[in-house]
Amino acid sequence: PVNVLGVGGGGREHALSWRLRQSPTCGELFCAPGNAGIAVEQGVRVVSLDETDHAAVVAFCADNDVGLVVCGPEAPLVDGLADSLIAANVPCFGPTKAAARLEGSKGFLKDLLRKYDIPTAKYERFADPEAAKAYIRKEGAPIVVKTDGLAAGKGVIVAMDEDTALRAVDDMMVNAAFGAAGAEIVVEEFLDGEEASFFAVVGGGVAVPLVGAQDHKRVGEGDTGLNTGGMGAYSPAPVLTPALEKVVMETIVQPTVDGMAAEGCPFTGVIFAGLMIKDGEVKLLEHNVRFGDPECQCLMARMRGDLVDLLLRAANGTLGDAPEMAWSDDVAAVVVVAASGYPGAYKKGETIKGLDAANAEEGVKVIHAGTALDEKSGDVVSAGGRVLGVVGTGASVKEATARAYAGVDAIEWKGGFCRRDIGWRAIEREEGK
């Protein structure tokens, strides 16, 4: 068995910890910094490590005979955590600093896609706000404006009119609303259609397909209101047929892997391809270098194989002879319970009850995101914007979401809210509407 350290403390990391723990090859499992849900997950030890202190992470791995580090969030990867681990001979599932530019720099990504002829929206890069505005006036709206650097998923403005696009340029480049992330921007054509996500595990030039998912980004029902990190998701994604998944692997994922190697920054980790699908054609919106959150919760609920073995093979470049990953045929759906006010200002430290009752519902698993333990009372309290992810599994999207909502309804937290229409498009499709 292999001792594993998971890095991160959100919903994605709770889901990963839960699934890693069930892997036959998993020895001791640590998670830093973890959260209140990971802390009570059987067989997982939460440790207080600062992931920005690379030397401390390396020392922990040496002291605890860690044979695999699984990095959940993107920021430590963009900061070069994998490089520090590799230098100390600790296998790491996650890209080097150079390879993490796939997500860390929108401009780097778009240039790579153009060079290797990977289908995507047409675009230009700008370091000068006036040049960006001139391009926007020339192209017209709708148009998309993105910060080049990481902005916690909020640096993308889909402008339906020219004024909004021009204001976005000023916000990013002149008023520095996103700090250094907005010093350079990408302006690209607006693509419409149906969005979906596809995931692949990559290492040693080999890409192993996982499965697809769809998520709901908007805070309000009917997909309205402000963009968030994601209010719910489901897997599989009905729009991603097996034939289309093959196209995604052949025209998007594998050419990306080959292109990264050719550029001298071979990729190890997960590629999370954000796709736009219209009339059976698929284009890449963006790549991320981590499991999506909340999509990861659905993937982990459906996964049946040995995740530790798969991720270790990726880290060691031996994916070529990996056994095929097994998946449940069931649908998994996750409903995010967020703090009132999210994605704007919200309160923290509110007591949450009923979690055991929610977990006792048929086909339900409660995943913690922004939670903490109150040291005095021992209660679980809210500690973030997205606080819980309630996963339901069932034979259809309709059954899976119904189970997830039964779990949500068992939770007692006045300051929480969720969207009540997760999966609505897929349910309409199931019912033949």
Image (tube, helix red, strand yellow):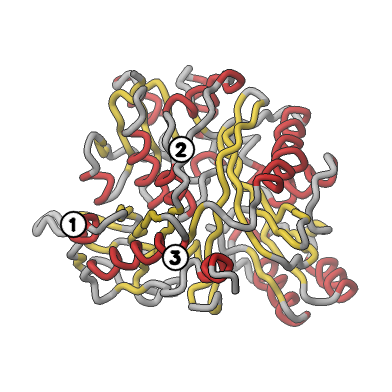
Q: Residue furthest front?
A: 432
- Residue at mark 1 to residue at mark 2: CA–CA distance: 28 Å
Q: Amino acid at mark 1?
A: Asp
Give residue 94's position: percent from left, percent from top. 53, 34
Is 138 situated left or right of 89 in this image? right
The mark closer to the camera, 1 or 2, is 1
| SS label for mark 1 | helix
Out of 208 and 280, give the one closest to the viewer.
280
In the drawing, what numbered circle is on residue 398? Answer: 3
Give the residue displayed 29% in from the left and 49% down from the top: 35
**Residue bearing the label numbered 1:** 356
Question: Is residue 223 in view?
Answer: yes
Q: Residue at x 70, y 52 (%)?
A: 106
**Which residue sits furthest left?**
377
Q: Amino acid at mark 2?
A: Cys
| Whole-percent x, y for residue 369 in the image | 35, 55
Q: Is residue 366 above or below residue 40?
A: below
Q: In the picture, which quadrant includes the N terminus? A: top left
**Quadrant assignment for the C terminus:** bottom right
User: Residue type at mark 3?
Assistant: Lys
